Protein backbone atom coordinates (compact mmCIF):
# COMPACT_ATOMS: atom_id res chain seq x y z
CA UNK A 1 0.00 0.00 0.00
CA UNK A 2 0.96 3.63 -0.40
CA UNK A 3 0.56 6.64 1.84
CA UNK A 4 -1.33 9.57 0.34
CA UNK A 5 -1.37 13.27 1.18
CA UNK A 6 -3.85 15.68 -0.41
CA UNK A 7 -3.31 19.40 -0.81
CA UNK A 8 -4.74 22.32 -2.73
CA UNK A 9 -8.13 22.67 -1.13
CA UNK A 10 -9.52 26.00 -0.01
CA UNK A 11 -12.19 28.57 -0.69
CA UNK A 12 -13.30 29.47 -4.20
CA UNK A 13 -16.14 31.45 -5.68
CA UNK A 14 -18.71 29.84 -7.93
CA UNK A 15 -17.31 29.66 -11.43
CA UNK A 16 -13.77 29.61 -10.14
CA UNK A 17 -11.08 26.93 -10.18
CA UNK A 18 -8.95 24.92 -7.80
CA UNK A 19 -6.36 22.21 -8.36
CA UNK A 20 -6.00 19.41 -5.87
CA UNK A 21 -2.88 17.30 -5.57
CA UNK A 22 -2.46 13.81 -4.19
CA UNK A 23 1.15 12.94 -3.40
CA UNK A 24 2.03 9.30 -2.81
CA UNK A 25 4.90 7.53 -1.15
CA UNK A 26 6.50 4.40 -2.54
CA UNK A 27 8.35 3.40 -5.69
CA UNK A 28 5.52 1.49 -7.34
CA UNK A 29 3.07 4.37 -7.71
CA UNK A 30 2.76 3.71 -11.43
CA UNK A 31 1.00 0.41 -10.61
CA UNK A 32 -1.80 2.11 -8.65
CA UNK A 33 -5.15 3.29 -9.93
CA UNK A 34 -6.04 6.52 -8.13
CA UNK A 35 -9.47 7.90 -7.43
CA UNK A 36 -10.90 11.08 -6.00
CA UNK A 37 -13.95 10.98 -3.76
CA UNK A 38 -15.79 13.67 -1.85
CA UNK A 39 -17.97 13.77 1.21
CA UNK A 40 -20.28 16.58 2.22
CA UNK A 41 -21.67 16.82 5.77
CA UNK A 42 -24.37 14.25 6.37
CA UNK A 43 -23.78 12.51 3.05
CA UNK A 44 -22.02 9.40 1.88
CA UNK A 45 -18.61 9.46 0.28
CA UNK A 46 -19.20 9.91 -3.45
CA UNK A 47 -17.00 9.05 -6.40
CA UNK A 48 -15.62 12.00 -8.37
CA UNK A 49 -12.96 10.78 -10.80
CA UNK A 50 -10.31 8.12 -11.31
CA UNK A 51 -7.28 7.45 -13.44
CA UNK A 52 -5.95 4.00 -14.19
CA UNK A 53 -2.50 2.80 -13.21
CA UNK A 54 -1.48 2.86 -16.85
CA UNK A 55 -2.89 6.43 -17.21
CA UNK A 56 -4.64 5.19 -20.31
CA UNK A 57 -8.14 5.47 -18.88
CA UNK A 58 -10.00 8.08 -16.91
CA UNK A 59 -13.50 7.98 -15.49
CA UNK A 60 -15.71 10.75 -14.13
CA UNK A 61 -18.93 11.10 -12.23
CA UNK A 62 -21.65 12.66 -14.36
CA UNK A 63 -21.83 15.61 -11.97
CA UNK A 64 -18.26 16.71 -12.74
CA UNK A 65 -17.84 15.57 -16.34
CA UNK A 66 -16.63 18.43 -18.52
CA UNK A 67 -15.61 20.53 -15.49
CA UNK A 68 -13.03 18.40 -13.68
CA UNK A 69 -9.91 16.80 -15.15
CA UNK A 70 -7.82 14.10 -13.49
CA UNK A 71 -4.20 13.54 -14.48
CA UNK A 72 -1.08 11.95 -13.08
CA UNK A 73 2.67 12.48 -13.10
CA UNK A 74 4.26 9.17 -12.18
CA UNK A 75 7.72 10.73 -12.03
CA UNK A 76 6.44 12.88 -9.16
CA UNK A 77 4.15 10.18 -7.72
CA UNK A 78 1.33 12.69 -7.84
CA UNK A 79 -2.22 12.76 -9.16
CA UNK A 80 -4.01 16.03 -9.83
CA UNK A 81 -7.65 17.03 -9.96
CA UNK A 82 -8.20 20.26 -11.86
CA UNK A 83 -11.60 21.64 -10.93
CA UNK A 84 -13.09 24.35 -13.12
CA UNK A 85 -16.50 26.02 -13.20
CA UNK A 86 -16.95 25.23 -9.54
CA UNK A 87 -20.44 25.17 -8.06
CA UNK A 88 -21.58 25.50 -4.45
CA UNK A 89 -22.65 21.85 -4.57
CA UNK A 90 -19.00 20.89 -5.09
CA UNK A 91 -18.37 21.87 -1.47
CA UNK A 92 -17.05 18.83 0.41
CA UNK A 93 -13.99 17.19 1.86
CA UNK A 94 -12.08 15.66 -1.04
CA UNK A 95 -10.16 12.43 -0.56
CA UNK A 96 -7.78 10.62 -2.84
CA UNK A 97 -7.52 6.86 -2.75
CA UNK A 98 -5.26 4.30 -4.40
CA UNK A 99 -5.38 0.61 -5.15
CA UNK A 100 -2.80 -1.45 -7.02
CA UNK A 101 -3.87 -2.64 -10.47
CA UNK A 102 -7.52 -1.75 -9.85
CA UNK A 103 -9.65 -2.01 -12.99
CA UNK A 104 -11.12 1.29 -14.11
CA UNK A 105 -14.53 -0.33 -14.37
CA UNK A 106 -14.95 -0.69 -10.60
CA UNK A 107 -13.45 2.56 -9.33
CA UNK A 108 -16.78 4.03 -8.21
CA UNK A 109 -16.89 1.92 -5.04
CA UNK A 110 -14.86 3.32 -2.11
CA UNK A 111 -14.54 -0.17 -0.67
CA UNK A 112 -12.31 -1.16 -3.58
CA UNK A 113 -9.57 1.20 -2.42
CA UNK A 114 -7.40 0.35 0.58
CA UNK A 115 -5.15 3.43 0.74
CA UNK A 116 -6.69 6.80 1.60
CA UNK A 117 -5.47 10.30 2.27
CA UNK A 118 -6.63 12.47 5.14
CA UNK A 119 -8.79 14.71 2.96
CA UNK A 120 -8.75 18.38 1.99
CA UNK A 121 -11.65 20.80 2.36
CA UNK A 122 -13.09 22.51 -0.70
CA UNK A 123 -15.62 25.27 -0.13
CA UNK A 124 -17.37 27.03 -3.00
CA UNK A 125 -19.29 30.19 -2.24
CA UNK A 126 -22.17 31.42 -4.33
Image (cartoon, grey):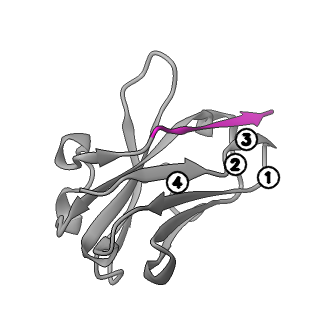
Q: Quadrant of residue 125?
A: top right
Secondary element type, mark 3? strand
- The residue wearing badge 2 is 86
Secondary element type, mark 2? loop
Mark 4 or mark 2, which is nearer the start of the sequence?
4
Using residue 27 as the reference point, say whether residue 104 is left or right of it: left
Q: Is residue 25 above or below residue 74?
A: above
**How far apart in space, not on screen, are marks 1 and 2 (Cα)?**
5 Å
Secondary element type, mark 4? loop
What residue is shown at x 23% (from left), y 58% (from top)? Answer: 99
- The residue wearing badge 3 is 10
- The residue wearing badge 1 is 16
Looking at the rendering, the stretch of residues picked out in magenta corresponds to 118-126
Using residue 9 as the reference point, say whether residue 54 is left or right of it: left
Residue 82 location (% of width, % of height): 62, 63
Using the rendered image of the protein, determine whether residue 38 is visible from the camera's viewpoint: yes
Amino acid sequence: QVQLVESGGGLAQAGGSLRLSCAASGRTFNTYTVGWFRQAPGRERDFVAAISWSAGNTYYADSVKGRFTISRDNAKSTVYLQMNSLKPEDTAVYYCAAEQFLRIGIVQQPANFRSWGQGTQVTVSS
